Image (tube, rainbow, N blue to C red):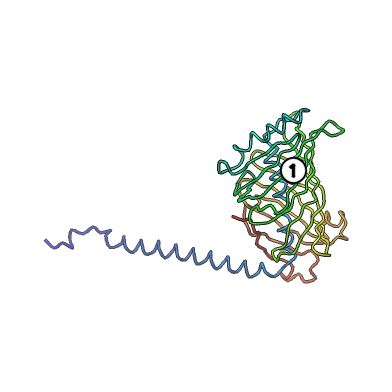
Amino acid sequence: MNSALLRSPFSSARPAALVLVALSALTITACDEALDAAIDAVATDNEEAQNAVDSMQQGSLEGALHAALMDPVTLGDDVAAMVAEAEAALADTFTPAGCVTSTVTGPSASLVFQDCSGPYGLLDMSGAVNLAFSINAESQVATSMSAVGLQVNGATIGLNLQGVTTDDGTSGARTYELITGGAGATRDGVPVARAGNYTAVVEGECLVLNGAWSVTIQTDVRAATFTSFKRCASACPDSGSMVWAGAEATSEDIAAAATGLALTFVNGSDTVAWVDRDAESAAGAGTGVTRLSCGN
């Protein structure tokens, strides 16, 4: 009997189907690469947008580290007990095992990180951090956190943070009231300093930031206001919005969407869309995207 007559009617279709699947995969990959290239090309067009997202990412990492260190601590009036609890929780909070060492002296803990990762998207963290506890005049738990040249998520940042930690009496939700005087750098290595106030609220496994700070880049000063900026497990922010405006912008101008760059963070993506509210042209020149350097 002719062996061709015994061949399955699907045998000839199977190679064709495999070819179609392979071609589809190549097409998707090519499209993704083309999209990435297009985004990168556009993203280089607005230095202000790049500075805005870098400032937000670096500042939020400061708040994320503070929360990661404080989340396990039971609030009370015994400073020594809180320092000991924070130290004991390090092994469960940061990976890999043994990546952080600590020394406790009175109300302070000196921590040394070596390629550590932790909650709220903290990645590849190396450097020395000091965390100190106290009880303020309102009988609240106060903390200060400092560091110079801390490597985290691909950025080098300085920490200078003062905080007050409270727990909601009904829901138990933890809130950190924070004052920052931290520092960082632009992608070109230009030093950046920030100063301002914000809150960080723990929501499940996420941290939600609201507030504002001024950012000084050489002699230029910008005002950054951010709303519902959420950090979860991803190295990039989960969601949130930000307005980046000139130092002369008033809170009323920002609230009325009258000035500055409006930026939107979505879905843990490193692509951030922006709208220039000050652009004179309405033909598309006032919109774009920029890349967020998350370190992932």
Q: Quadrant of the N terminus?
A: bottom left
Question: Mark 1 — residue?
Answer: 200
Q: Is residue 103 left or right of residue 225?
A: left
Q: Quadrant of the C terminus?
A: bottom right
- Residue 128 or 82: which is nearer the viewer? 128
What x and y, as percent, mark residue 36?
58, 65
Establish if 30 lies above or below 107.
below
The three-letter code of the residue at mark 1 reads: Ala
Q: Is residue 257 left or right of residue 100?
A: right
Q: Secondary structure at mark 1?
A: strand
- Residue 249 or 157: which is nearer the viewer? 157
What x and y, as percent, mark residue 128?
68, 47
What x and y, as percent, mark residue 121?
63, 48
Q: Residue at x 70, y 70 (%)?
A: 45
Q: Residue at x 79, y 46 (%)?
A: 198
- Residue 3 or 240: which is nearer the viewer? 240
- Residue 241 or 296: which is nearer the viewer? 296
- Quarter of the rendering containing residue 256: bottom right
- Quarter of the rendering containing residue 144: top right
